[in-house]
Image (cartoon, rainbow, N blue to C red):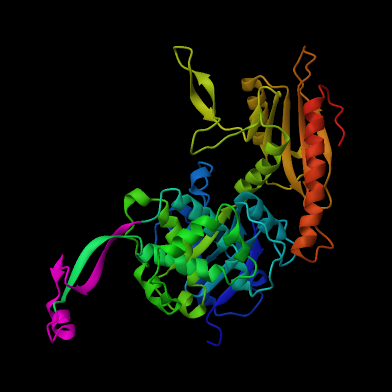
Amino acid sequence: MSNPYLYGQTEDNNHSVSLDEIFETEFPKELLNELYDISGKKISDLKNQDGFLIYCNEDKLKDDVESSSIFTISGNKLTTYNIAGFIGTKHTFLTIRSRFAKENDDYFLHYMLQKVFNINISTLEHATDRNKAFQFLPYLFKYYFLQALSQGLYKKYVWNKYNDSKVKGTIDIARHIKHNFIFTGNIAYNVREHSYDNNINQLIRHTIEYISNLKMFSMMLESDDMADLVQDIRSITPTYSEKNRQQVINNNLKSDIHPYYSEYEPLRQICLQILMEDDELKYGRAENKIYGVLFDAAWLWEEYLNTLIKEIDSNFIHTRNKEGAGRIYMLKNENNEPKYWQAYPDFYSKKLGIVMDAKYKHANGISKIGSDDRMQIISYMHILGLKKGVFLHPADNKHAGNISYGKLNIPEKNTDEYVYQYCFKIPQGKINSMQDFIDEIEKSEIKFKEYLKSVLSQNNEMVKC
């Protein structure tokens, strides 16, 4: 087989696309067996298999996401959902772009990642299909690096070898005979002691030095929240040598991280993926059955909006499912205490009288919003006692900038409660670089902030952008 690897790309929520269209080349059909093995399986089950599958962001996931699948295959059709990123097996590699991607350049997904993970880049380097997918990894390195270092520098027991007169630990007879054939007072011995210069920190150090040579991301290491921590890792790994990279990778293929340092486990996996980017390292190991990095695109959209909304008014509460932050209860118990039916509106403020729902769906006008979404936001408005509900959609050129609203129809009551829909323009068309995209989407952000301020400042439906 001249090319043992099968590369394909599609977009999230693709409504079923032919496999021939996704891979756009003739290929041995048996390679698809590896994709069929993933089809329809829960993300939580795939994560438990051998390999390096990382699903971000685990501490803020919607409750039902890990029980969903990345894609399903039926006949010759592959269907994706809200999951973006990349996933690969021994011989196949599938990139899943944002549905708002422009051809092969997924500026929108990269821009949301930059905003959510607080990384600024203005270029998106040209790369092969595989390397383009691996451009996602440094975003996650920063996030998990900061999470891990918040637990302190990783310290573990290591065996150190000495040959001097200060004997402690276990005498190494063979080494002593070899090095001290003529006795000069030195004894060869081994000591098990706590050390920062260990396999994990060496792995992190090698990853730092690798990223420092990436044009797109090298400045990330010098950011205010990274620079001092990067220097700490460099200072505690004096035995670092680039030529030892393969051995460091091998030493970290299986985790032995102490449970106290739980945040270091996802960092270990990200570091391995980054360092194993080379073909010989990544694809030469049959034991890595599944690898990849996946993002819940709906979560990214919500978190991206949060970076904008919190700039407008600090009174907004952005709920967190896993942390239970900002949750509401829709039922009280027998003691009249709110206790049952937990719910998590995306954004709300009782002070401002508004609740907002981030919807990562194409917008087609407020009359076309699905029944479940309609009932959800009306329930939130009613339980919280709020008069304004807003749907926030990303939109292509056809619907960009559309603003629509409707007044709640409550019989025999002249209500002043309204539901709005805002279509946030995602730049498309003549976008030739990452900087072009940034320039255009910043215009969309300004319009969105103006719109939201106008909604907050008025008490009737006449909201202009």
Say if the magenta span includes residue 87: no
Residue range in magenta is 155-184
Say if the magenta span includes residue 179: yes
Depth order, front residue of 76/81:
81
Q: Note whether 99 is above or below 104 in the view shown.
A: above
Residue 136: name its quadrant: bottom right
**Is the C terminus in the top left, top right, bottom left or bottom right quadrant?**
top right
Residue at 81% in and 44% down: 446
- Residue 193 seen anywhere in this rendered image of the structure: yes
Depth order, front residue of 242/278:
242
In this rendering, position of residue 31 left or right of residue 202: right
Residue 77, image x and y in percent? 61, 63
Depth order, front residue of 63/180:
180
Residue at 47% in and 76% down: 283
In this rendering, position of residue 287 left or right of residue 276: left
Residue 353: name its quadrant: top right
In this rendering, position of residue 458 left or right of residue 221: right
Residue at 83% in and 23% down: 460
